[in-house]
Amino acid sequence: MKIKNWQLALALGVGAAAIAINFTSCVSIPKGAKAVRPFNKDKYLGKWYEIARLDFKFEKNLDNVTATYSLRDDGLIKVDNRGYDYVKNKWKQSVGKANLAGDLKEGRLKVSFFGPFYAGYNVIAIDKRYQYALVAGNNLDYLWILSREKTIPEEVKKDYLEKATGLGYDTSKLVWGNQDRD
């Protein structure tokens, strides 16, 4: 049986779609971590200052990092990350999108900066006023401590570090960012 070009193209298209679906649904949470519940998406919107992070490629050499979340017209969340590259002496910005992953009352989101590829963004601790947050990625390679202000109280910092360590994070590798530019 001879395969025609359109049949091959259809088969490849279906295969690519299956792979894309697999990648886009690959948002997880580190073992033992639990996302905040109940979670109020609307209260989470707004500007957050990055106090600390586990460093990775896209934030290398950045300080003064902020993340601003706002509602888009299509119901998704706009994610606007900005930071100052102190090696290149210039601001860097990356805009993506996010959506709640699964239960709408749980602090689990899926975030994308690259087309159909999503990563887990899990709010695993937050205060009642939504001023300070501890956020885990898909695994123990990604962790952020966020604040609505440029600093964080010592007791909150201590609590979040204990929680992260208890989950298996190596908090000695956290990069503590500066927030000294506007």
Image: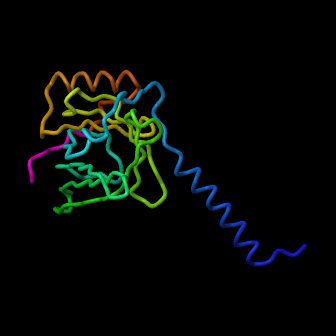
Q: Nearer the viewer, residue 99 or 2?
A: 99
Q: Is 167 on the left or on the right of 11, as rendered?
A: left
Q: Residue at x 23, y 50 (%)?
A: 68
Residue 4 in the image: above or below residue 67: below
Residue 56 in the image: above or below residue 6: above
Q: Residue at x 37, y 21 (%)?
A: 166
Q: Is 170 on the left or on the right of 4, as rendered?
A: left
Q: Main secondary structure of the magenta part?
A: loop
In this picture, which residue range is highlighted in magenta?
A: 175-182
Q: Is residue 84 magenta?
A: no
Across and down, in percent, residue 128 comes to 22, 26
Q: Is 15 on the left or on the right of 31, as rendered?
A: right
Across and down, in percent, residue 34 comes to 42, 27
Image quarter of the N terminus? bottom right
Q: Quadrant of residue 35?
A: top left
Across and down, in percent, residue 144 comes to 30, 38
Q: Nearer the viewer, residue 15 or 129?
A: 129
Residue 36 in the image: above or below residue 141: above
